[in-house]
Image (cartoon, rainbow, N blue to C red):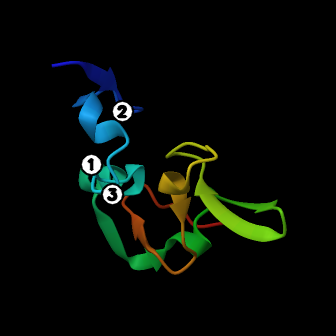
Amino acid sequence: METQIDIFGNQIPLEQVNNPKHETIKTRWRKMYGYDDQHTCGTCRFTCDFEVNGKRHLKCNLMGISESPDTNIGAADTACRRYEKMD
């Protein structure tokens, strides 16, 4: 079985790479770092705000910045345990 290494260094089967049912990067990130139920991504210092073609996209600097919707986050999303308050 052929595999590909994801951004976390894990090997995943190639058939899962373009499978819409595979976990998003955000889901895997939260499995690794857990949740911080007291905060949201919108108040985290690692959240970046991008505008592309008139649409706002939020990304996490720790998770990685890409053009993929798999790395989009929401301001109201529950933060992960790597949360740090915005200055």
Between marks 2 and 3, how big is the CA–CA gap?
12 Å
Residue 71, percent across and down?
51, 53
Question: Residue at 36% of width from left, 59% of height from top?
Answer: 81
Residue 62, percent across and down?
53, 45
Q: Which residue is mark 3?
A: 27
Label placed on residue 32: 1
Crowd around label 3: few <14 · some 14–19 · many ≥20 (10 Å): few
Between marks 2 and 1, how big is the CA–CA gap?
10 Å
Residue 21, percent across and down?
27, 56
Specify the amino acid type for callout 3: Thr
Q: Is residue 35 above or below residue 65?
A: below
Label 2 or label 1, whichever comes before in sequence order: 2
Question: Residue at 84% of width from left, 69% of height from top?
Answer: 54
Residue 34, located in which quarter of the rendered image? bottom left
Crowd around label 2: few <14 · some 14–19 · many ≥20 (10 Å): few
Between marks 1 and 3, how big is the CA–CA gap?
9 Å
